[in-house]
Image (tube, rainbow, N blue to C red):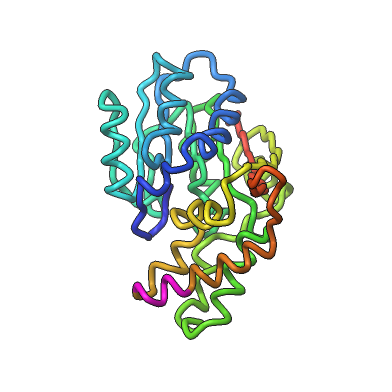
Amino acid sequence: MAGKVDWDANQYLRFEDERTRPPLDLIQRVRLADPQRCIDLGCGPGNSTELVATRFPNAVVEGLDSSPDMLEKARKRLPQLSFTLADLESWSADGRYDLIFANAALQWIPDHPALFARLARSLAPGGALAVQMPNNLSEPSHVSMDEAAAEGPWAGRLANARASKAVIGSFSDYRRWLMAAGCEVDIWQTTYVHALAGHDAIVEWFKSTGLKPYIDPLPAGEREAFLALYREKIAAAYPIEPDGKVLLRFPRLFILAVRR
């Protein structure tokens, strides 16, 4: 994970199984014969880094994140690996990588044309850039955030909360940018459907990610009021299934680029 917010690793890991499915799907698509150097950008608590290290056990695997709390969890989980505290937006590679892995991190970084070109330049010939980004800003889970932000006494303070996430480009955009950077490109999108234990679970899911730009600027009382309003909107948008679960739709964009 990346971005200039105070990430809470424990909150993030409440849904570790569900959050690990996309990077697991992504790493299985990476075909590298004998990578020597790999990095997990926005590594969070190390769940995605562990997948990289397991997939390529002979490689030197690094993790990088902007959150001290996330890195503390990652180091405890994988003490044999190297983890670095750094801001991904200003990070530049020290040498070339055979694999640059970025799971649910780059959506927090602006200027994707420049960002993806920079990452492609950091690949060794034949190296792979493997990216997964949530592509769910039009889902009720995120539309409800903006609606709640606009309706309360906090509206002025939260006017720019949505701007904390970069606008995800089109399939054509990423293919064009990466081909111009000398890569062969494979792009796909998967909508995961998570059966969660009620509407409160959806709120808890996003408290560690998408809701943070909305709730972090608010004092405790307003934060609770905002979350209550958000939950009302979630309850209206997600029907309860016969078994009491609610189905959270979660589209995710995948990009696999190999440098020529």
The residue under the point 35% across, 51% down is 8
Q: Looking at the image, which is closer to me, 123 or 153? A: 153
Which percent across, then down, holds residue 188?
Answer: 71, 38
Q: Looking at the image, which is closer to me, 148 or 26? A: 148
Relative to 220, 180 lies left or right: right
Q: Looking at the image, which is closer to me, 162 or 225? A: 225
Which percent across, then down, holds residue 70?
Answer: 33, 44
Q: Is residue 30 above or below residue 161?
A: above
Magenta span includes 31: no
Q: Quadrant of residue 96?
A: top left
The residue under the point 32% across, 36% down is 74
The residue under the point 49% across, 62% down is 211
Q: How many marks?
A: 0
Relative to 75, 238 lies left or right: right
Q: Looking at the image, which is closer to me, 155 or 188? A: 155
Q: Main secondary structure of the magenta part?
A: helix
Which percent across, then down, holds residue 145?
Answer: 57, 67
Which percent across, then down, holds residue 229?
Answer: 55, 72
Q: Is residue 21 above or below residue 197?
A: above
Relative to 244, 116 lies left or right: left
Magenta-colored span: 220-225
The quadrant the C terminus occupies is top right
